[in-house]
Amino acid sequence: MKNFSYILLLSMLLFSCKDKPVNTLETTASTRPIEAPEVIEVASFKGQQVTGVSVTNEGRVFVNFPRWRTGVTNSVVELLNTETHSPFPNKEWNSWEVGDKVEANKFVGVQSVIAFEDLLYVLDTRSALFQDVLEAPRVFVFNLNTNALVNTHILNNNSYHPNSYINDLRVDKKNNRIYFTDSGNSGLVILDLETEQFTRVLDNHKSTKAELEYLRFGETKWTNTVHSDGIALDTKNDKLYYHTLTGYSLYSISTAALVLDNAMEIANAVTFEAKTSAPDGMIFDDNGNLFYANLEHNKIMYRKPDGSTHTFIVGEKVRWADSFSIYDNHLYYTNSRINEVTAGISAMKFTLNKVALPNN
């Protein structure tokens, strides 16, 4: 009877587990209870919608504010402490207003800032109020030792469209290139730093094209179509990862394939990596973990080199985690609260936070 009871109990357990539904997104995340890491607010900005963040090797912190509306006080600032920030490189560079004449040495619509070694790359979409590009998109490069402009890389006509929104970038030191995503008109752009030539690849390709017309936040739909957006460079394996914002598919391509002459060969080199949540920015840490947001559920996720996905942090301190940077074993992220904006933002607070990286 004891053996029969044991067999009956085992059969009941197996049957109860057999048909349980499986979440197709991030199914491999660990379910073991883990103490939530502390989220520290680094800075807040009332009425100024922050998107990009980058921390230098020396700990200097830069953030930017896109010109999605009038009333943007500064495009790029350096945080001096939790309460004080200074326009970078100076006030004049940040003085352009909607309706002004476009000038060479003034920011128009800055979407991203990336500190790499002793340089700061400021990506100016040259688009204001989500309108067509006023001039060619460009990257201003500043020497962080002097804060002086040392180069301006201007996209040529074949590398962008009038409705392009060049969104983010990664610097590839090994191959002396910069890679960009275009979220306004799907595709990737490559800058060869030796020749100063821009090349557009995977234009309107399924991997760079938005999969959805909206994201869902509870009972609310955020209706928008945003193409190739998040981008992250795996320097250990020489692969570029990218993701549409309104979509659930993570793709990669080898950096060697990105410079092939044949468009079909480039397309054939694209690898579908995984189904994920809908993210914005992405970044790799030194352990090969890929961090990205789960926008619809107030989370930040990470994907290990073995392909398993895990929840890093979740809750009200994650409100559209937009861009990431890593410094001193901490992940810095901006809360741009894009889905919450329905009218004016003068009373809204947007934050830059940091949290210690997981020990794995």
Image (cartoon, rainbow, N blue to C red):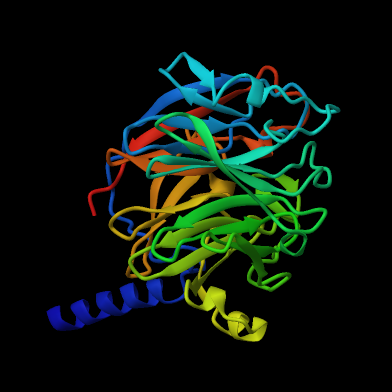
At 65% across and 38% down in the image, what residue appears?
110
Work out whether 81 lies above or below 323. above
At 59% across and 80% down in the image, what residue appears?
266
Residue that lies at the very extreme toward the top in this rendered image: 83
Q: Nearer the viewer, residue 212 or 216?
A: 212
At 23% across and 49% down in the image, what residue appears?
359
252 displayed left or right of 129: left
| Residue 119 sits in quarter | top left
Q: Which quadrant of the figure contains the C terminus?
A: bottom left
Q: Nearer the viewer, residue 206 or 275?
A: 206
1 displayed left or right of 224: left
Residue 302 pos. (x, y %): 40, 55
Work out whether 228 lies above or below 50. below
198 displayed left or right of 305: right
Residue 206 pos. (x, y %): 68, 73
Residue that lies at the very extreme toward the right in this rendered image: 99
Residue 82 in sight here:
yes
- Tally the marks: 0
Q: Nearer the viewer, residue 254 or 347?
A: 254
Residue 168 pos. (x, y %): 58, 50
At 31% across and 38% down in the image, what residue appears?
37
213 displayed left or right of 340: right
Residue 338 pos. (x, y %): 66, 38
Work out whether 138 lies above or below 44. below
Q: Which quadrant of the figure contains the N terminus?
A: bottom left
Work out whether 90 lies above or below 356. above
Residue 292 in sight here:
no
